[in-house]
Image (tube, helix red, strand yellow):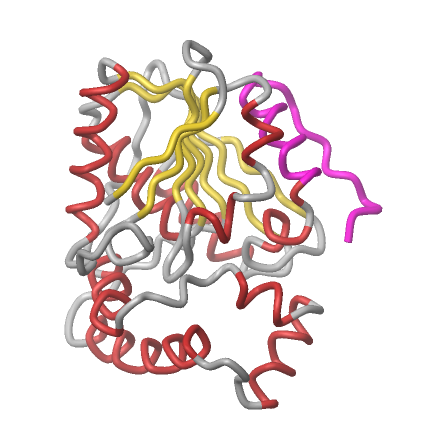
């Protein structure tokens, strides 16, 4: 696991956590400078998801423990803010559940918080991993898959560009599997933490909102109109920065209707 810091030392610190099969550069390269104007930005590169890290991703718990250790050693156990994209939101959920470090503002992005017991977790992972691995590795994915992504996002190449090409099959498999079988507790309420859950309205909003309230009953839900899974971050980085600056200041964020 690797950590990368940007911005002026001494500013309030905000940690950015990437998602499954992606990289911190792929997801956050276009937003770091905008946030680093006001905050110290820390990006984490999970095991197996970073060109400077040659470890295999073995379990989501390893990443949680590694992040806790980093926060304790470098920030006295206290961060001002954390944003977790997709899988990164699951990590945030476990950090909040364990409550071993203080996070003032926690923001999840399109995290589904899906949980499965075996054998369903094994079956689901066995079905999804080969397809996703192919999409990440293929220089030119078959037309039917490109068309599928184009239909959803409008630009399959930009979506695939977020992915980390160096990931191993074992790392990708372990990410899916261990995330599914590592539950996040229900009814997480922390006295000194504000929780925001952001999601696109073209996702399965009924399921997502039910799970958000299940895990974080006092969270503020932020619906991003017309957006798919993390589309807002990938395709609208400037507007995403604006959203983050509002939420990190504990201000209401009004999503503009004219954004793609």
**In the rendered structure, does residue 185 fall within the stretch colored magenta?**
no
Q: Is residue 163 left or right of residue 237?
A: left
Whether residue 201 is situated above or below residue 76 in the rendered picture: below
Q: Position of residue 134 (x, y in %)?
A: 40, 81
Q: Quadrant of the C terminus?
A: bottom right
Note whether residue 217 is visible: no
Quadrant in which residue 30 is drawn: top right
Q: Residue at x 65, y 83 (%)?
A: 147
Q: Which residues are magenta?
A: 238-260
Front-lying residue, 236 or 222: 236
Name the outermost residue toward the right: 258
Foreground: 192 or 79? Answer: 79
- Measured as percent of width and height from the top left, residue 250 is found at 56, 18
| x, y percent for residue 76 | 23, 13
Instruction: Give the tally of numbered discs.
Output: 0
Which residue is at a point 44% across and 36% down the rendered structure image? 83
Q: Residue at x 72, y 38 (%)?
A: 255
Q: Quadrant of residue 106?
A: top left
| Residue positioned 69% across, 47% down in the render | 236
Q: Quadrant of the N terminus?
A: top left
- Is there any visible trace of residue 183 in the rendered image? yes
């Amino acid at each position: 696991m690797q950590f990368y810091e940007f911005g002026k030392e001494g500013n309030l610190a905000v940690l950015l956590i990437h998602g499954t099969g992606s990289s911190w550069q792929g997801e956050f390269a276009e937003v770091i400078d905008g946030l680093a104007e006001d905050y110290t930005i820390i990006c984490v590169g999970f095991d197996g998801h970073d060109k400077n890290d040659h470890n295999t991703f073995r379990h989501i718990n390893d990443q949680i423990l590694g992040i806790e250790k980093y926060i304790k050693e470098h920030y006295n156990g206290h961060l001002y803010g954390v944003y977790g994209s997709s899988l990164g939101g699951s990590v945030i959920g476990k950090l909040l559940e364990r409550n071993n470090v203080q996070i003032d503002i926690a923001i999840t992005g399109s995290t589904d918080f899906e949980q499965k017991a075996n054998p369903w977790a094994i079956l689901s992972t066995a079905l999804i991993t080969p397809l996703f691995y192919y999409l990440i590795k293929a220089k030119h994915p078959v037309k039917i898959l490109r068309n599928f992504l184009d239909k959803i996002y409008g630009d399959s190449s930009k979506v695939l560009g977020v992915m980390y090409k160096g990931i191993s099959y074992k790392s990708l498999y372990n990410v899916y599997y261990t995330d599914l079988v590592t539950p996040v507790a229900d009814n997480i309420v922390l006295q000194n933490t504000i929780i925001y859950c952001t999601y696109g309205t073209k996702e399965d909003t009924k399921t997502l909102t039910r799970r958000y309230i299940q895990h974080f009953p006092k969270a503020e839900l932020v619906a991003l109109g017309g957006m798919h899974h993390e589309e807002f971050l990938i395709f609208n980085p400037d507007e995403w920065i604006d959203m983050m600056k509002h939420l990190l200041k504990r201000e209401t964020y009004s999503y503009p209707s004219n954004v793609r």
